[in-house]
Amino acid sequence: MAERKIVVTNETGLHARPAASLVQFVKNYPGDVKLVKDGKEANAKSIFNVMSLGISKGTEIGIIVEGEDEEAFADKLTDFIDNLSE
């Protein structure tokens, strides 16, 4: 299991388009990917789960990756979230 913490810097947080982009990015990863906010976990492969967390700009979230090459994918996902834009 690989874990990361990151502060969301995108202006709109992880709502609508950015959330859809995130889901598209992780959906082909063969393992499990979860986002954690305030102790609540969500499957990052589900747009509804991601949006249910209500992640806004400046929110610190956790990333949990389990599966093949989990450390490398966790790093890629962290970079992806860092570079999200509208």
Image: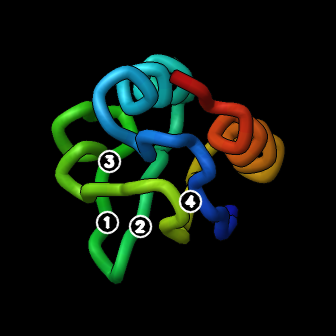
| Picture disc at residue 63 | 4
Give the residue displayed 39% in from the left and 55% down from the top. 56
Image quarter of residue 34: bottom left
Nearest-to-viewer mark from 3 and 2: 2
Q: Residue at x 30, y 45 (%)?
A: 50
Would you call the spot at circle 4 few (<14 residues within 10 Å), some (14-19), or many (20 or more)?
Answer: many
Q: Amino acid at mark 4?
A: Ile
Q: Amino acid at mark 2?
A: Val
Report whether 8 appears left or right of 46: right
Amino acid type of the residue that numbered disc 3 sits on in the rendered structure: Asn
Residue 4: which quarter of the image? Answer: bottom right
- Residue beneath the point at 52% across and 39% down: 31
Estimate the x, y position of residue 26 in percent, counting from the top left. 51, 29
- Residue type, label 1: Glu
Q: Label 2 vs label 1: CA separation?
A: 4 Å
- Tag 3 near tag 1, CB within 8 Å: yes
Q: Which residue ends up furthest to the front in the rendered image?
A: 11
Determine the residue positioned at 26% across, 58% down.
Answer: 53
Q: CA distance from mark 4 to mark 1?
A: 9 Å
Label 2 crowding class (10 Å Cα cut-off): few <14, some 14-19, many 20+? some
User: Is the residue 81 above or below the residue 22 in the image?
Assistant: below
